[in-house]
Image (spheres, helix red, strand yellow):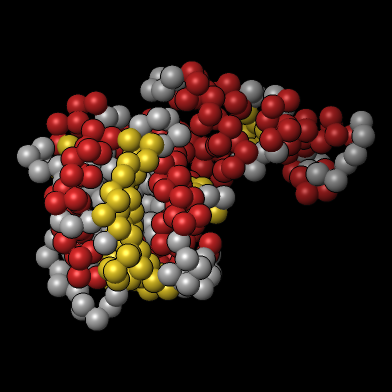
């Protein structure tokens, strides 16, 4: 019998000293590729495009979360034996990352407040600051609140509020059918109870019989001129529709949502905004001009003006 025809399934069950022989046989099988120092290979490939720190972080995600290596084995520097299929998968991952596609899109998921949310090109990747906003809301909102999330994207805010406040009624709008499809999938996968609607907040005329205790929004707030300071993985891949506002009207969405809030919020209802840190005071002033009370800024964990809260 040729070594190349030995049953690899049987050799997988060898124990003790036979493990060495098993690995030797696997090396000879055409359907297996043994990658010596896989982590080093990944880092070398990625350091062509990323910093050493970024490459190390991506390497851990690839090995542990996508190729199934245990965290212990990864940090012990143990080598991996990859099947041809796994090798091809790894090549595809590295190719996408070299094109600066965000790792969240490559994985198809991201973590938000400890839950796994699906994401894909066409849907904004949730940020840690938005987690902070939801945590603030969960501490303040009544358990049975009626909540409207405007510009829901992946559904991370709406679904997280629905899970954290199971007696609340949560409605979520977005202008993008693609985003709503992803939000629906996240809602179903996480067994939340959000109601979704396709809506362009700048032009829609919602039924004023629908009243809410809370309106929350993380609308587009990045100025067009700020593109010069942004990374390729954002500019080339994430949806511009969810990111940018004209330089000449940075409060475009906030002003419109505040107008809707005067019609849709109950007396004493609250607005929660995530904002561009450069426009906190301007947002507060705009809300005061529209008749809102107690408008104030909260900082994020990095010390930047990031959230504005106001009462109708």
302 or 261: nearer the viewer: 261
Residue at 18 percent of width and 40 percent of height = 282
Give the x, y percent position of residue 117: 48, 55
| Side of 221 where 124 appears, left or right | right
Residue at 24 percent of width and 26 percent of height = 229
Q: Is residue 46 above or below residue 269?
A: above
Q: How many marks?
A: 0
- State the image quarter where residue 263 is shown: bottom left
In this view, the residue farthest toward the left is 248
Can residue 109 be seen by looking at this rendering?
no
Q: Is residue 188 above or below residue 289?
A: below
Q: Is residue 57 above or below residue 169?
A: above
| Side of 302 where 220 appears, left or right | left
Q: Say which quadrant the N terminus sits in.
A: top right
| Side of 146 where 22 appears, left or right | right
Residue at 28 percent of width and 49 percent of height = 295
Residue at 30 percent of width and 71 percent of height = 266
In this view, the residue farthest toward the front is 293
Q: Is residue 135 above or below residue 198?
A: above
Give the x, y percent position of residue 228: 19, 27
Q: Say which quadrant the C terminus sits in.
A: bottom left
270 or 221: nearer the viewer: 270
In this view, the residue farthest toward the right is 16
Can residue 286 be seen by looking at this rendering?
yes
Give the x, y percent position of residue 86: 57, 42
């Amino acid at each position: 019998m040729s070594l190349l025809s030995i049953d690899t399934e049987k050799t997988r069950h060898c124990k003790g000293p036979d493990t060495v022989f098993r690995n030797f046989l696997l090396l000879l099988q055409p359907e297996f590729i043994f990658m010596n120092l896989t982590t080093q290979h990944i880092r070398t490939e990625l350091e062509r495009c990323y910093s050493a720190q970024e490459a190390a972080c991506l390497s851990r995600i690839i090995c542990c979360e996508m190729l199934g290596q245990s965290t212990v084995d990864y940090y012990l520097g143990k080598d991996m034996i990859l099947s041809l299929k796994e090798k091809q998968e790894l090549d595809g991952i590295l190719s996408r990352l070299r094109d600066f596609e965000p790792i969240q899109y490559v994985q198809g998921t991201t973590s938000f407040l400890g839950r796994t949310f699906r994401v894909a090109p066409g849907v904004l990747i949730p940020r840690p600051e938005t987690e902070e906003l939801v945590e603030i809301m969960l501490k303040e909102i009544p358990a049975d609140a009626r909540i409207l999330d405007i510009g829901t994207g992946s559904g991370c805010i709406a679904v997280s509020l629905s899970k954290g406040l199971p007696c609340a009624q949560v409605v979520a709008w977005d202008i993008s059918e693609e985003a709503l499809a992803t939000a629906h999938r996240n809602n179903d996968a996480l067994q939340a109870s959000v109601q979704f609607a396709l809506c362009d907040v700048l032009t829609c005329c919602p039924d004023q019989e629908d009243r809410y205790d809370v309106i929350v929004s993380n609308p587009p707030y990045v100025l067009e001129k700020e593109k010069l300071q942004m990374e390729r993985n954002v500019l080339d891949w994430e949806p511009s529709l969810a990111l940018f506002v004209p330089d000449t009207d940075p409060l475009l969405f906030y002003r419109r949502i505040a107008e809707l809030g005067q019609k849709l919020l109950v007396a004493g209802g609250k607005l929660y905004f995530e904002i561009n840190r450069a426009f906190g005071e301007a947002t507060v002033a705009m809300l005061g001009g529209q008749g809102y009370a107690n408008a104030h800024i909260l900082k994020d964990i990095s010390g930047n003006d990031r959230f504005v809260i106001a009462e109708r």
